[in-house]
Amino acid sequence: MIRPLALLLTLTVGTAALAQSMPQLTRDNGAPIGENRNSRTAGENGGVLLEDTTLIEKLARFDRERVPERVVHARGTGAAGSFTATADLGKFTRASLFKAGKTTPVFVRFSTVIHPNGSPENLRDPRGFAVKFYTDQGNWDLVGNNLPIFFIRDAIQFPDMIHSLKPSPITNKQDPNRFFDFFSATPEAVNMLAHVYSNLGTPASYRTMDGNGVHAFKLVDADGNVTFAKFRWISKQGVKNLNGAQANAAHFNYLTDDLYGAIAAKDFPKWDLMVQTLTPEQVAALPYNGFDDTKEWLGVPFTKVGTLTLDKVPDNFFESTEQSAFAPSNMVPGIEASPDRMLQGRLFSYADTQRYRVGANALSLPINAPRVKVVNNNQDGALASSERSANVNYFPSVVAPKATPDRYRASTATLSGVVDARPISKTDVFTQAGVFIRGLSAADKADLITNLSGDLGQVRDDRTRTIIVSYFYQADADLGTKLAGTVRVAMPEVARAVREYAAANPAQVASN
Ligand code: HEM
């Protein structure tokens, strides 16, 4: 019998010539396959045979194609490139990548936060901006967002906040009644809510947004001295956003298409890495808690330390972007965690989820593996491929000693205090939200009200709407008053909520 595909090939070029030029299809064991379109059956109308190992293997592999999507930041896109340091940060940190002129390869993944893998890219959200630096001292992951602050300040609240923002467990739809219920009891979120509901929540392109490390980090010099630092990526393309109507009109894949298109056209996007530094004494003197990630270090000058260029999109989306595993715990000597309670929780959460999502050997995959040799006794687990042949898989060993020199010891810190679970002091919830709102242009402020009213206006509970308006009112009275008008809240009720808040939070500094 001559099959249609074979007939076509015979007629055009001749099977012998083609057989030589085409790669041979094989099974996973490398054995050549002679038939890939028809299953083996017991005669024309008989059952399909279990002995058809090509069929069984193909279906079994297909059945296992998906790994769990990221529990947050599931929808993303990635690109590779390099970071070139333009200033020497040796005064503050022994991290080797910050030597002027030094180039380090990077992989970057941009993402939305709440919406699932395969969701449209035009939905309002903070945007992830995660950078993996493959340094010569191991990988450093700066896992940040486009916005400079965050909703909450303690990791213990993160699962609850995400549950409120993810689809309802009953209707499977995202529901403003649920997340504004959470935020009505979380006043410190008002700064982040003001940012997310501004047009920053719908960037025109991943190339036209800034990035932020958000938390304070600890820089440690060669003598063990500590300076605290915050990192920011400034887009050399400029910051450009969409308003609500433009975002609604943007197509499903607009951010990925834009990034891939620019790189294909050799219009390589670039960002400058800026750093703010403060001594421990300067952090302590701030009028707010300097390790509170709902705050920026406003007024602290930025210094440029290098430039990031993205110039290659992955050849294989799944193996690069989907299996990439960024973790704040991936740090290098000279960069350490500050006491920021969110960052401290993140140090655990990312590597933990990745051992579940990608597997125990996630960091052995080419996209995640450091460019330096890994030497330790962590071993085995699913898909281990270390090719280790040494007999010594323990430490210490006299026959095969391994070095742990003092110059790589982490910094020391002197502590005093009471072990307890209590909120931070110096909360100052509203000041910076007010500074942000008053810094918006008139058009951007109008868009913030329109964007926010769209979701807040759907909330059925009068008290929830009133409380949220009262938080915005305490940040900026003008915006709060206008918002009240668009979401059916009476101003006397707002005034009452403000009084109740002040009575319950006597230490809170009102901003206006
Ligand atoms: C305690 C608070 C937080 C927890 C527990 C948390 C947890 C997580 C988890 C479990 C993932 C999925 C990781 C994976 O599957 O590979 C993730 C992704 C991510 N998170 Fe967080 N997160 C927190 C706060 C933040 C903050 C404050 C930022 C921004 C500064 C942030 C930025 C990101 C980014 C950019 C990703 C995606 C990384 C990628 O592209 O693969 N997260 N987060």
Image: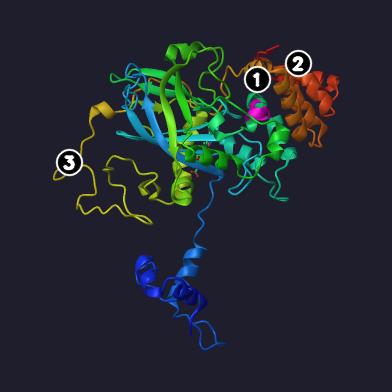
Amino acid type of the residue that numbered disc 1 sits on in the rendered structure: Ala
The 10 Å Cα crowd at callout 3, few under 14, some 14 to 19, many 20 or more, is few
Where 355 sits versus 307, above or below? below
Residue assigned mark 1: 433
Mark found first going from the N terminus, 2 or 1: 1
Of the numbered discs 2 and 3, the one sitting upstream in the chain is: 3
Majority secondary structure of the magenta segment? Answer: helix
- Residue type at tag 2: Ala
Which of the two labelled residues, at mark 3 and mark 1, occupies the earlier sequence position?
A: 3
Up the image or down, 94 lies above or below 125; here it is above
**Viewer-closest of 499 and 268:** 268
Residue under label 3: 401
Give the residue type at disc 3.
Pro
Most foreground residue, 98 or 270: 270
Q: Nearer the viewer, residue 161 or 455?
A: 455
SS category of the residue bearing label 3: loop
